Amino acid sequence: MKTINLRTAAANPLTRFLCMVVVFFFLVGDAATHADLSKLAVLEQRIQSASAHPDFPDDVYGLIVINQALTSLKAGSGGIGACLVNSRTGQVIETGRNRQHAPHFRSDLHGEMDLLNRYEDRAQKTRDKTTNPRECRDLVLVSSMEPCPMCLTRIINSGIKTMIYVAEDPDGGMVSRMDQLPPFWQAFAADREYRKAKCSPDIEQLAMDLFNYSNRSFARNRKNQKNKIKP
């Protein structure tokens, strides 16, 4: 069996170069991980210090959904949280969060989708002559971010008539583009109230920062790759 002389190998310029590259990427990766964890710790401290402002009636629910978003980030998924509220009592009856990347990839499990899955599985609604499974009387859906097209049509289809979101998503949100939905979905949503929540600037900024912590890096990477291969 051939043996390797480590001293001779270390003296080889190519070997030294490769070792330096490995060490460099190890240190950079470790530093990036440490930086990410530090940013997340700062976000968590800001959330723990936040409180509902009396001039902003939706802050109390904004705090709930941003805490869900933080939990999602800690679990390795996207920074979006959501909850369902009984508007008559103010009681939160269900919570949800983005679970797209952990424990394994699920392309459908955005925060609002997870929330509705949990609510509908628990409610176990059925369709018969006396009940309407889309009857969601008094329920308000609260999301930390403006829902994307997939989530918006799911919310419309669920029957929920009131939905509010803490922060706008100009790149991917669909509520501000309701007039661009297909005619069927526009008609289906004609009696709904979907709007931005009345939250304080601090709560809104936290929702945005949680979202931006892991915001669509795959989309940016694809765009950069396409730009590189243009003739």
Image: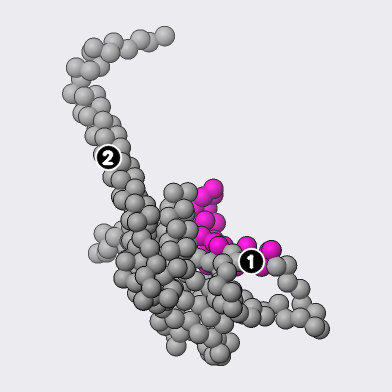
For the rendered model, the colour scheme is one colour
Q: Position of residue 7 (x, y in %)?
A: 23, 12
Could you say which disc has been placed on residue 119 in the image? 1
**Front in this rendered view, residue 6 or 150:** 150
Q: Which residue does the image show at 27% across and 39% down from the upper left?
A: 31
Q: Which residue is mark 2?
A: 31
Range of magenta residues: 95-122
**Cβ atoms at labels 2 and 1 below 8 Å apart:** no
Badge 1: residue crowd in 10 Å (few <14, some 14–19, many ≥20)? some
Q: Judging from the image, what secondary structure is the residue with disc 2 in?
A: helix
Q: Judging from the image, what secondary structure is the residue with disc 1 in?
A: helix
Amino acid type for the residue under numbered disc 2: Ala
- On screen, residue 57 versus residue 5, left or right, reads right
Q: Position of residue 218 (x, y in %)?
A: 38, 58
Q: Quadrant of the N terminus?
A: top left
Q: Position of residue 210 (x, y in %)?
A: 37, 59
Residue lying at the far front of the rendered structure? 54
